[in-house]
Amino acid sequence: MILLRTPLLELARITASASGFPRHTHDEYVISANLGGQEQVWLEGESFVVSPDMLTIYPPQAVQSSHSLSDAGWDCLSLYVDPAAFGQLFDCPPPDLPSHLQQPVFARQLKHIARLEASLREEAIVQLLQALLDGRAAAPHRPDSNGSQLVQHIRQRLLDDLSVGTHLQQLADAAGVTSAHLVRRFQQATGLPPLAWQMQQRMALARRLLRAGRPIIDVALATGFADQAHFSKAFSRFCGMSPGRYRQINI
């Protein structure tokens, strides 16, 4: 199941059978975390067992294979990163990353990304990649109430029309910075990356419109959702109840 697809990034949930995958290569970096089960990996002559609290990282063109250690197979999340992404997102050459990290925080980070609203996954992936480049998990930043001119400009751009969706790369291009720089600066100033911050504003507007008695489909369109079903799913996730229930108890 594809959870995100952009020209440079793809996140997928994969169910593998007990027989696993024969020796093969990928053009991209493949960064994976198992959701359940254990697999035995062979990676360019090295063998290791992958458990659900590990992150595995296969570099481009590396020969690899894997099989399950039980008859049940395994489920995993795999993030495919085009090597060109590092130049475009971070202004750096493709890195030499370790083949596996026995640091559960990274595996948890990737699993958390899969549970996010679809529109928020790309910037969360940028944060994960930045953490891997830094060699540490992305730590929460302290909000900077003053902010910078860059952050103030992006905040206003995100607020200008909440009915129109935007993309992280569009914001970065408009500001003349890399996506990674934008995410880092915005989070330092506000405590959230830009699209997550905008989603909070969209949900706040949705609550105001629902309290005013607006039809749910109108609220969905006014807050940048393509249809009522997508809006209802997002609203329930953020607010703990359906939009219909929220409107009922607040009118």
Image: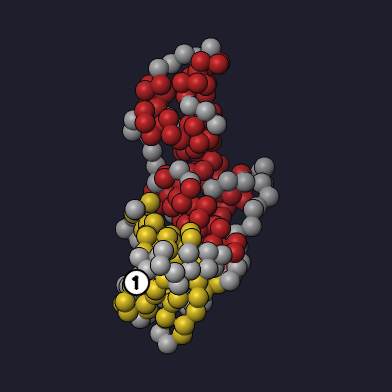
Horizontal side of 217 relative to 250 (left or right) equals left
Say if 172 sits above or below 195 in the image: below
Horizontal side of 74 relative to 149 (left or right) equals left
Tell me the residue at 41%/31% (across/down): 231
Tell me the residue at 38%/38% (across/down): 165
Q: Nearer the viewer, residue 113 or 178?
A: 113
Outermost residue to the front: 71
Name the spot of residue 207 as percent of width and height, x first.
52, 24
For residue 10, say whether it is visible. Answer: yes
> Quadrant location of residue 166?
top left
Tell me the residue at 48%/59% (across/down): 35
> Quadrant location of residue 151?
top right
Name the spot of residue 52 as percent of width and height, x first.
53, 64
Q: Nearer the viewer, residue 52 or 62?
A: 52
Name the spot of residue 82 as percent of width and height, x first.
36, 67
Outermost residue to the bottom: 45
Q: Residues within 10 Å of mark 1 (few under 14, many from 20)?
A: some
Q: Nearer the viewer, residue 156 or 23?
A: 23
Tell me the residue at 66%/43% (across/down): 146
Name the spot of residue 25 as percent of width and height, x first.
32, 76
Label tally:
1
Horizontal side of 58 relative to 200 (left or right) equals left
Mark 1: secondary structure: loop
For residue 159, say whether it is visible. Answer: no
Where is mark 1, residue-wise?
A: 19
Q: Amino acid at mark 1?
A: Ser
Colouring scheme, one of rainbow, by chain, secondary structure, one colour:
secondary structure
